[in-house]
Image (spheres, helix red, strand yellow):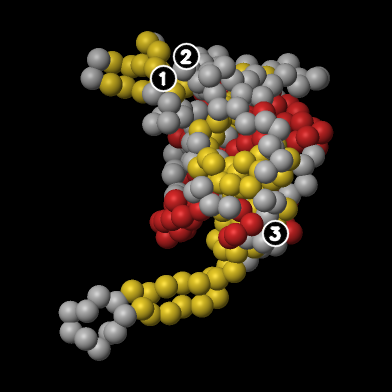
Amino acid sequence: MNYRLSPSDLTFLYEGCKHCFVLKVKHGITQPSIPLPSVFSIIASLQKDYYSDKRTEDFCPGLPPGIVRHGEKFVRSDTIEIPGCESTCFISGRFDIVAELDDGSFAVMDFKTGNPSEEKSNIYTRQLHAYVTALENPAPNALKLSPISRLGLLYFTPDKCEQVGDSTLRGAATRQTIEGEMQWIEIERNDSDFLSFLKDVVNLLDGPIPDPQPERCDWCSYHIKKDSHTGSFSSRINSKAGEQTSPTCPSCSGPMRLKTGMYGEFWSCTNYPACKGTRNK
């Protein structure tokens, strides 16, 4: 099996619930989509547009000198073979921004809004290393940027609010601005630790489905309560575990799920709409 691994899933879903992580990656059973509050997406989008083609040292003194060259690009790694693992994996996702440094190397950066902490930074390390792996070892025709010498987080911490314009004038437009510090949190690159982490991930996926974790996962808790009346979700999981693994997507090699269209059942990529690969049943 060649598992498709999303950088964000390696960061949040794997850490939050390994039961749900295996169901999504291996069996195509996903949790309900709960997007980030739209305000954070808007802030990140505005930042990416604003900092495009700007000198790094001009907007954050802690950054190495260079120019922001790439924003919101999709990446995909070549197949990753891990010693001691039966299956393989590959990375597929989208980064925030990458700067081309003056020394010819690259810096991978991720925007965050909030207060930085060591605990948060340690979790985001996986996400950044996944981007590095995909960019330096890309699949054929995928984006390649190498070498990558720096990686880290750009934290925006709001601390001031002001109104712009005269609110006493009838019909006059007023605007509100939010200001805050931009802080660069350097993440130390450690390829061997990340490869060891990927080995744990692949071994987990190759093994049995982990037990639900209702004490830390709301989705598991919900279905355990529901199953006490219907048993439907447990039956679905057991059925999936006993079936042959779903086919792989012809476009991205990720897992597929069975869907029903106007012409009957067909296999659809679980990465839709980013990937629109299909197979006939």
**Disc 3 from disc 1: Cα separation:** 42 Å
x then y, percent, for residue 88 = 68, 19
Q: Quadrant of residue 213?
A: top right
Label 3 crowd bin: few (<14), some (14–19), many (20+), radius 10 Å: some
Residue 259 visible to the viewer:
yes
- Which circle, 3 or 2, is nearer the viewer? 3
Q: Amino acid at mark 1?
A: Gly
Q: In the structure shown, which secondary structural element does the residue marked by tag 3 occupy?
A: loop
Q: Residue at x 46, y 29 (%)?
A: 271
Alpha carbon distance from label 2 to label 1: 6 Å
Instruction: Answer with mark 3 or mark 1, whichever residue precedes in sequence.
Output: 3
Q: Residue at x 49, y 41 (%)?
A: 72
Q: Is residue 84 above or below residue 38?
A: above
Give coordinates of residue 130: x percent, y percent.
Answer: 65, 36
Do the residues under discs 2 and 1 have CB atoms within 8 angstroms?
Answer: yes
- Element type where label 1 sits in the image: loop
Among the two numbered marks 3 and 2 on one chain, the one whose residue lies closer to the N terminus? 3
CB-based contact (under 8 Å), mark 3 and mark 2 = no
- Mark 3 near mark 1, Cβ–Cβ under 8 Å? no
Query: Which residue is the site of mark 3?
Result: 62
Q: Amino acid at mark 2?
A: Pro
- Label 1 belongs to which residue? 277
